[in-house]
């Protein structure tokens, strides 16, 4: 059974670039059968897909975030991370790290939903 | 962007009832639809993927079906632990996956 746990700052100032980390246990990020992603949830926008990374090194982002977001997979520490540039109050949300099974990667892959979720970390953007 | 419209927004039901939740996609998503259950203060949990395949450990009372761009989650014999919010999710339009706004199932 895979477990995911988010960590990072709970309070961020506007214009900063926070980094969130997801620690993986019970599984390995060195897997060609999984993808590692981030989803956020806020009262105003509901659930939003941010993007994902693969062991291969490929990353894919929701175009709504593409210019501000970066996801990396750290195989040495079995973690993956999200950086979100120049945050504003609109980025206040609960951020979940997620993992799902996949066969292949990118637009041609077969996906099997988001099978594993972290508990979520609330990030508040405020001065 | 594929818009997923869930209905109803809230569904009031009693334990033992059969309930049906709807999710309509604004364009074809093949059968790349998942359903999740979210309880208060918790992360969503995968119930169904590929429109009708139950995830590991999900009780058989949960089932999913599809007809074109209309997707349905059915709970046969609602249990007390099933009162929660349910979301549909399309993972067809890569990389812009989207979620529905949710249906809350509460006790009548």
Image (cartoon, coloured by chain):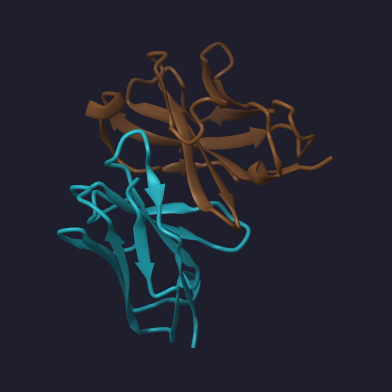
Is B52 left, or right, of A56 in this rendering?
left
> How many numbered marks, from 0 up?
0
Quarter the C terminus of chain A occupies: top right
In the displayed structure, would residue A87 be above or below residue A42?
A: above
Q: Nearer the viewer, residue A87 or B91?
A: A87
With B65 as the anchor, is B49 left or right in this view?
Answer: right
Residue B102 coordinates in the image, percent (x, y): 45, 63
Q: Which chain is cyan?
A: B
Image quarter of residue B54: bottom left
Q: Residue at x 35, y 57 (%)?
A: B4
Locate residue B60 relative to residue B99 in the image: left or right: left
Rendering coords of residue A60 (x, y %): 41, 25
Q: Residue at x 30, y 25 (%)?
A: A106
The image position of residue A85, as x and y in percent, is 64, 26
- At 24% across and 49% down in the image, what residue appears? B50
Q: Residue at x 32, y 51 (%)?
A: B34
Looking at the picture, tell me which residue is in the foreground, B16 or B18: B18
Q: Which chain is brown?
A: A
On the image, which quarter does residue A79 sit in? top right
Res. A121 visible in picture:
no
């Amino acid at each position: 059974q895979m477990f995911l746990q988010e960590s990072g700052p709970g309070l961020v100032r506007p214009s900063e670039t926070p980094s969130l980390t997801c620690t993986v246990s019970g599984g390995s990020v060195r897997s060609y059968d999984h993808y590692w992603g981030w989803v956020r949830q806020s009262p105003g926008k509901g659930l939003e897909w941010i993007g994902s990374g693969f062991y291969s090194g490929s990353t894919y982002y929701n175009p709504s975030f593409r210019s501000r977001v970066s996801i990396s997979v750290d195989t040495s520490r079995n973690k993956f991370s999200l950086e979100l540039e120049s945050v504003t109050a609109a980025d206040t949300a609960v951020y979940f790290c997620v993992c799902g099974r996949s066969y292949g990667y990118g637009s041609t892959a077969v996906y099997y939903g988001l099978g594993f979720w972290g508990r979520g970390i609330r990030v508040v953007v405020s001065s | 962007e594929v818009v997923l419209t869930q209905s109803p927004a809230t569904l009031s039901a009693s334990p033992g009832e059969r309930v049906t939740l709807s999710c309509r996609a604004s364009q074809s998503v093949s059968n790349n639809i998942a359903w999740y259950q979210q309880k208060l203060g918790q992360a969503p949990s995968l119930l169904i993927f590929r429109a009708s395949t139950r995830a590991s450990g999900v009780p058989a009372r949960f089932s999913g079906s599809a007809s074109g761009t209309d997707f349905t989650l059915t709970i046969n014999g609602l249990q007390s632990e099933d009162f929660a919010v349910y979301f549909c999710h399309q993972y067809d339009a890569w990389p812009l996956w989207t979620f529905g706004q949710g249906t809350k199932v509460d006790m009548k």
